[in-house]
Amino acid sequence: MKNTFTELASIPIKDKVERKGNFDYLSWANAWSMLKSVCGNASRKVYEAEDGLNYFTDGRTAYVKVGVHASGQEHIDYLPIMDYRNNAIPLEKITSMDVNTAIQRSTAKAIAMHGLGLSLWTGEDVPRMTTKKSEAKPKTITKITLDIGDENWSKVLKYIGANKQLGLSKIVSNLETKYKMKSSVKKEIQKAM
């Protein structure tokens, strides 16, 4: 039986990745084209709220919900409607262009859940670390020490559980961008895998 996820994950995307600001991304058009070349019957669904709008709101901000169906499976992505800095846009300032952009970005993320370009989001959900401001350099981010059982440990365990497919070395590498870890902590991470 063919594993579509593995096939899509193995497609090289490096030459299609673009950069906007500090973020790398695969355009929805490139992602859709590559997905359809493997899964010709793939389809997308933009979900609508009960009022018929193609976004949902909590009364302060909004998000879109997009599903991509391929090889008998649908993956759904929820994405906040954000500005170019990835900050949520207040509801009263959202334009139809902002909604359209969020739908296209959400489409690319839903496609990634099928395997294509998933590596672009590696580390996106690593638990955020607490930062300390240095008097000499106010914008310096200091890594915090991760200890077994501390307040960040349960978040790290959830991250490990959700990303086991990355393998031990990649998970440890991702976590080391945020945390200082002793060898005993790394051994516990290995046990959690």
Image (cartoon, rainbow, N blue to C red):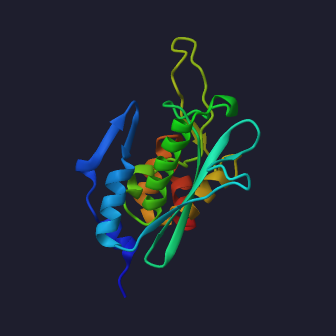
Position of 87 relative to 104 (above/below): above
In this rendering, position of residue 8 left or right of residue 101: left
Q: Residue furthest bottom?
A: 1
Position of 73 relative to 140 (above/below): below
Q: Is residue 127 visible?
A: yes
Instruction: Find residue 21 and report its horizontal and vertical position in percent.
Output: 39, 30
Q: Quadrant of residue 32?
A: bottom left
Please name the residue shown 40% across and 65% down the image. Answer: 115
Q: Quadrant of residue 146?
A: top right
Instruction: Find residue 168 and report its horizontal and vertical position in percent.
Output: 44, 61
Please name the residue shown 53% across and 32% down the image. Answer: 83
Please name the residue shown 51% across and 55% down the image. Answer: 186
- Which one is in front, 148 or 92? 92
Q: Is residue 148 visible?
A: no
Position of 153 relative to 180 (above/below): below
Instruction: Find residue 91 and report its horizontal and vertical position in percent.
Output: 68, 34
In this rendering, position of residue 159 left or right of residue 172: right
In this rendering, position of residue 131 left or right of residue 166: right
Please name the residue shown 53% across and 66% down the image. Answer: 75
